[in-house]
Image (spheres, rainbow, N blue to C red):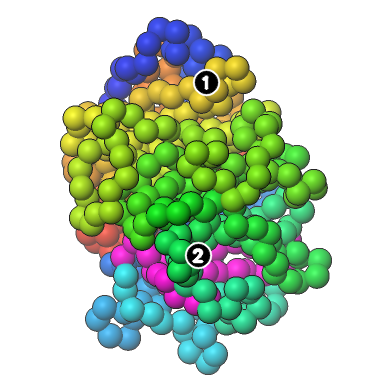
Amino acid sequence: MRWMKRIGKAGLAASALLLALLPAGTGQAAAVLTEVPYAMDSSNQAGWWSPLATYGTGNEYAYMAYNAPGSTPGTHKVYIARRDGAGAWSNIPVMNGTNVAEYIDDIGHNQPSIARDGSGRFHVFASMHDNPWRYFRSDTVGGPPQNHSADLPDAGMGITYPVVKTAPNGDLYLLVRGDQDPQGRRNGVLYHWNNASSAWSKVAVVASALNRAVYPNDLAFDASGDLHILFEWSHFPSSVLRHELSYLKYSPATGVFSKADGTPVSVPVTPATADKVQPLTGSEGYVNSSPDPGGPGVQSAKLTVDGTGSPLVAYRYREEGSSLFSVKYAAFNGGSGWVRQTVADTVQTKAAIDVTWTGSQARVYYATASGTDRAFMAVNTGASGWSAVSLAPGKPIERLAVERNAKGVDILYLVDITNLKLYYGRN
């Protein structure tokens, strides 16, 4: 394996605090990769998606939603690559009537997210960029998902960036950007799948502000069943560069939304009322621009929780005066609030990042924009900073997703766009 070292920039006080939040130790493990034996389309790449789901403590299963080549150039079909506990693969089509669901390529938007509910049914959200629902659900346990778009609330609303997660009780929660608001807003909207009644409902518009667009990042559940929510803000209607990475906690048992310190908040939150993981810095401000306008800002973030249910965040942030998106890590600590640390800032990164909690330390996953090795996992090494190990030596990985399964293994979803390959990994 190839190693690289990063010395943290945080001050001594912050480093001392992070020692308590991030137990020292290397924690690196050699990832074992397997090429998924199905053809992958070049459009299978995104930063916000949740294309991976795992299940089982005995026989381990992994479900990898992906874009396969379409019937004509510039299109793709949607499938689920299923790996069973013995390592055998099967390819499950996502069906739109009698045909496999097929859509026009739209990189960064038309990618699938998947979750498995408590009854064993697959739920797939695919290919939406200001489109009405494109939602598919298994009619039988483990069966090919069928089009059930009519089952969702807010029919006709434009939907983008669906992020879905399974709750400990088998329900699902879905965060999307709702794109139709004549008042100059693109809202963050939360939905709930009640597995017992097999029905969707709208929980709330959780984030909204005039002249702002919400970019969903991630959802995570803690052992108590509370939902942790992560999202970014941009100028309305959109921008490549986003700002004020924000956190929100929702308790399904009480219906209460709160900040990380437990302070209740009313929804929808705004940039002024949100719990900001990464506030504005220096000259940072909202700009309506595409391509990238330059300057400081956020682009891509992921979330997990530690053993106490406290949120841990990995994200890409471009500092004032820099041309590089560095890898950042933030942990919440009571009276000190969000404590941030630099994981890596010497090489340009891709919009691919994730984070898991091993039970004793955080693992931050990221991909670089160049180099022989591009996919890395980093762990905190105390006051000296972070140490990173290559996950896929020699493979030009550009996108990734990671989920820690029920047996305490990090399952990897690694995308090689150059060679049109998808890899399953164990770390």
Magenta region includes residue 366: no
Above or below: residue 353 compared with residue 215: above
Instruction: Tell me how many marks there are.
Output: 2
Specify whether 24 is left or right of 242: right
Specify whether 58 is left or right of 300: right
- Residue 240 % position (x, y): 29, 52
Find the distance from the CA under tag 1 to the CA under tag 2.
36 Å
Name the kind of residue labelled 1 in the image: Leu
Magenta segment, principal secondary structure? loop
Graded by Cα atoms within 10 Å as few (under 14), some (14 to 19) or many (20 or more), the crowding at tag 2 reads many
Specify whether 57 is left or right of 32: right
Secondary structure under the numbered disc 2 in the rendered image: strand
- Residue 332 % position (x, y): 56, 26
Q: Which residue is drawn at 55% across and 63% down?
A: 114
* Residue pointed to by mark 1: 22
In the image, 199 versus 88, the foreground residue is 199
Residue 362 at least partly seen: yes
Magenta region includes residue 131: yes
* Residue pointed to by mark 2: 178
Closer to the eye: label 1 or 2: 2
Picture quarter containing residue 136? bottom right
Above or below: residue 274 compared with residue 89: above
Name the kind of residue labelled 2 in the image: Gly
User: Magenta segment, which residues?
Assistant: 107-134
- Residue 150 % position (x, y): 62, 82
Marks 1 and 2, the one that precedes in the sequence: 1
Specify whether 301 is left or right of 117: left
In the image, 230 versus 410, the foreground residue is 230
